[in-house]
Amino acid sequence: MSIGEVLAHLRTEFPDTTISKLRFLEAEGLVDPQRTASGYRKYSWNDVARLRFVLTAQRDQYLPLRVIREQLDRMDDEPVAVAPARPSLVAVGAEKAADPSDTRIPRADVIERTGVSGSLLDELEQIGLVTAKPPGWYDGDAVLIVEAVVGLTRYGLEVRHLRAFRAAADREVGLFAQLLAPLVRQSDPAARARAAETARELQALSQKLHGALVRAGLRGELGR
């Protein structure tokens, strides 16, 4: 696979991943794709498995790359076997980043991949948490939202509680839209590219802030 195709596979699960991030992980020795005669990267499914391992360890365990590299070194004698995933219906060039909004996933696949019931999916649409695009496709972000909701409902959260998440996200979007407005109003393609990159950085910082605030609050509730 090209680096763009690898990104298309990873972005559904890790939406903040970029081509620059993949190149950085390669430079750090965490993955070593082959090169064609013309110098293009070519990734195997084992390379994708290593990248998924690295990104999961960073996201869920906050492990430094040094520790992740040591874990991968110990795993090298027992390489992970990965079955090819069903490809997303999205066109990607050799070096073009895939956008989760370009991914098209049918309703049946969303239900199969997330374990959501049809009735719960209908409720999520009714309260505006996810939106199906004609003729019934969902994008990559919708799948991430459904996965998160399914996990939360297992702990007893009800659909009515999710309206607060939607309202908070809308307020955040409004705030960030004001920050991005000066760049978005420019017709210069470079300005629009900066706007897209700024939006990604704002999202990452927001997630970092939100996670830290929730962790700090829960420590108080747990008396820690």
Image (tube, grey):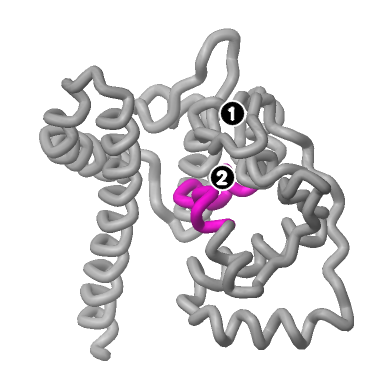
Residue 39 in the figure: left or right of residue 62: right
User: Residue 103 bears which disc, if any?
Assistant: 1
In this orientation, which residue lies closer to the viewer: 209 or 180? Answer: 180
Residue at image position (30%, 51%) is 201
Res. 115 in view: no
Query: Residue 18 in the image: x percent, y percent?
Result: 50, 49
- Quadrant location of residue 194? top left
Question: Which stretch is magenta?
Answer: 10-22
The answer to whether residue 43 is above or below residue 132 is below
Residue at image position (58%, 73%) is 28
User: Residue 11 bears which disc, if any?
Assistant: 2
Q: Amino acid at mark 2?
A: Arg
Q: Are discs 2 and 1 less than 8 Å apart at CB?
A: yes
How far separated are the C-alphas under marks 2 and 1? Answer: 10 Å
Query: Residue 45 in the image: x percent, y percent?
Result: 81, 54
Quadrant where the C terminus sits is bottom left
The answer to whether residue 75 is above or below residue 90 is below
Res. 214 in view: yes
Residue at image position (49%, 28%) is 101
The answer to whether residue 18 is above or below residue 171 is below
Residue 45 in the figure: left or right of residue 111: right
In this orientation, which residue lies closer to the viewer: 165 or 41? Answer: 41
Query: Residue 170 in the image: x percent, y percent?
Result: 22, 35
Q: Amino acid at mark 1?
A: Thr
Is label 1 in a helix, a strand or a loop? loop
In this orientation, which residue lies closer to the viewer: 223 or 15? Answer: 15
Seen as rendered, the residue at the extreme top is 135
Seen as rendered, the residue at the extreme bottom is 224
